[in-house]
Amino acid sequence: MAELLQLLRPHLQKLVPYSSARDEFSGEAAVFLDANENPLGSATLENYNRYPDPYQYRVKRMLAKIKCVEQEQTFLGNGSDEAIDLLIRAFCEPGQDHIIILPPTYGMYKVSADINNVEVRELLLSSDFQPRVEAILEAANAQSKILFICSPNNPTANLQNPEAVRLLLQSFPGLVVVDEAYIDFARVNSWTEKLEEFPNLVVLQTFSKAWGLAALRLGIAMASPEIIAILNKIKPPYNINELTQERALNAMRNFDKMEMHVKLILHERERLVKALEDLALVEKVYPSDANFVLLKVKGARQVYEYLVKQGIIVRDRSKVALCEDCLRITVGTPEENDLLLEQLALYSA
Ligand SMILES: *Cc1c(COP(=O)(O)O)cnc(C)c1O
């Protein structure tokens, strides 16, 4: 663990974080005159005149139970995107350190690094969209502070081979971030089970996909208490607003409903894949462990533009490495999927 803290940017080891009114006093009291809040409330919303809990204890208590981790192992961000940004800012010295990403993958790792003037080293996945472990470890050195592994991967939709991830966790010199935004659509256990075994592991999840709450902006990072403490130290004091905390609690109380939605989406995914495979313009549907599919078609750009004209927007990924002529299609409602399939059948006809 001492080693882990050596990965941290030196100036943060001495950082004195902002101390909010709620940090300095968090108990019960009759009168709160410590945070310059408006005691009368707002014109339109009730009970939002007080600053929210900066550490989101109620949300974390319920979340920790659902995820089978300790509260001290959980961090909440304004989307996973905030956690990605904070991890880069905490561990990567601009102009000196770098991150390693495995394209084709989620775009925010590179954008966040670029914003922070942190170098990005890219090691393409293999042709079957798996990490090339030897090449990654060969490219890594003491300045390799973070390796981002997305599993199931966006946009390829597949899980990353667990043996490869394990080897990387064992031998990569920096943090290994496993982004599990789509884990609820995969029939495997989360890497959170291995948090005790690998102190350099960070698992990202989100309320944006399976939970159906993308608009709330609530992302989850799970890691050793030491890493979580670092994120807490550098985050904006009140990064998760009160409405988001309340709605997330409500969603978690209705866990069954989320599971029902996931089941329906998985059922639709299977139906969509089968129907797509029958279309003449579809050359290949890649196996999916997520709520979207990647498919290779004849003339992806033309198919994309045709669908736009029909009012159906999919993602053209044909310019992305290893994804020539590929479209990424989110699994929609049964009606939406029918519309898509109908229009694609007309296109091929
Ligand atoms: C959608 C997605 C996220 C979610 O980001 P939020 O900021 O939590 O909405 C994270 N990682 C990947 C790979 C995604 O596709």
Image (cartoon, rainbow, N blue to C red):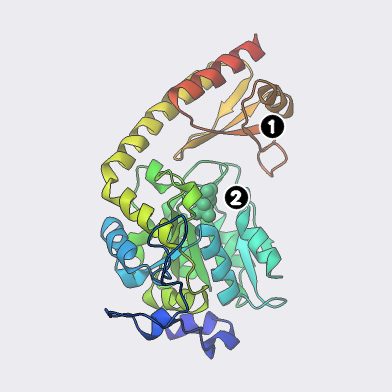
Q: Which residue, as the protein is rendered here, is positioned at the far bottom?
A: 14
Q: Is mark 2 within 8 Å of ligand 1?
A: yes
- Under circle 2, the secondary element is loop
Q: What residue is shown with label 1?
A: 325
Residue 245 against residue 234 in the figure, above or below = above
Percent position of residue 134, x then y = 57, 60
Residue 296 shows in the view:
yes
The residue closer to the viewer here, 300 or 29, is: 29
Q: Identify the residue at image location x=70%, y=64%.
A: 114
Residue 131 against residue 292 in the figure, above or below = below
Q: Identify the residue at image location x=53%, y=91%.
A: 14
The C terminus: image quadrant: top right
Amino acid carrying label 2: it is Thr
The residue closer to the viewer here, 19 or 114, is: 19
The N terminus: image quadrant: bottom left
Q: Which mark is residue 138?
A: none
State yes or no: discs 2 and 1 in contact (Cβ < 8 Å). Answer: no
Amino acid carrying label 1: it is Asp
Q: Is residue 140 left or right of residue 172?
A: right
Number of on-image labels: 2
Q: Identify the residue at image location x=32%, y=69%.
A: 57
User: Of callouts 2 and 1, which one flags the residue occurring earlier in the amino acid sequence?
Assistant: 2
Label 1 crowd (10 A; few <14 / some 14-19 / many >=20): many
- Under circle 1, the secondary element is loop
Q: Which mark is residue 105?
A: 2
Percent position of residue 259, x then y = 31, 40
Q: Which residue, as the protein is rendered here, is positioned at the far top?
A: 349
